[in-house]
Image: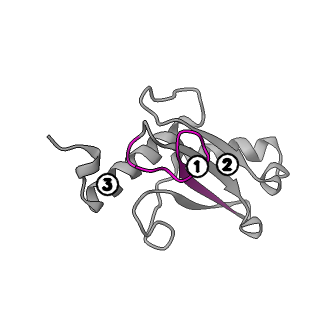
């Protein structure tokens, strides 16, 4: 029987990408996947200043994002994306923490040991 700890790097990257995709799709809250990993969705002050209509549209775009490439996603984890919103570049970044949100996850592919934080930010705030 293969366990999460036995995964090769390619299998582990595919598993993390699938978990990150499930988490991103769940952020709208109107149809959350029962098996979506746990986490938080946050934004920087610059993104919040774009206003509530922009935030709703950006949230929709993050949830639907599927244009990952080797420049923005070199590990294949689907952890970073770039969105052009009305001439403004907005990034999203997923970070994987331990269950207490204090340190990096000890086993990023294990949802019982990993909590996600998805941050919307402007490049100037990085």
Question: Label 2: few (<14), some or many (≥20) within 10 Å?
Answer: many
Give the numbered dot on residue 62: 1
Where residue 119 sits: x, y (%)?
65, 52
Name the residue located 60 percent from the left edge and 44 percent from the top edge: 101
Give the numbered dot on residue 12: 3
Going by the picture, which residue comes out furthest to the left?
1
Q: Toward the viewer: 8 or 79?
A: 8
Name the residue located 39 percent from the left edge and 62 percent from the top edge: 76
> Which of the image's four quarters has the C terminus?
bottom right
Q: Toward the viewer: 76 or 65?
A: 76
The quadrant holding residue 29 is top right
Where residue 32 sits: x, y (%)?
51, 28
The quadrant holding residue 41 is top right
Give the numbered dot on residue 84: none
Q: Nearer the viewer, mark 1 or mark 3?
A: 3
The stretch in magenta equals 90-110
Query: Disc 3 on helix, strand or loop?
Result: helix
């Amino acid at each position: 029987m293969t366990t999460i700890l036995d995964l090769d790097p390619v299998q582990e990257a595919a598993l993390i990408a699938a978990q990150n995709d499930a988490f991103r799709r769940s952020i709208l809250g109107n149809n959350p996947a029962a098996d979506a990993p746990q986490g938080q969705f946050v934004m920087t002050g610059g993104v919040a200043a774009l206003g509530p209509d922009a935030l709703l549209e950006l949230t929709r775009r993050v949830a639907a994002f599927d244009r990952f490439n080797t420049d923005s996603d070199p590990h294949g984890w689907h952890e970073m994306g770039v969105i052009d919103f009305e001439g403004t570049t907005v990034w999203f970044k997923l970070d994987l923490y331990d269950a207490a949100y204090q340190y990096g996850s000890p086993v990023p592919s294990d949802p019982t040991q990993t909590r996600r934080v998805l941050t919307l930010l402007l490049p100037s705030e990085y």
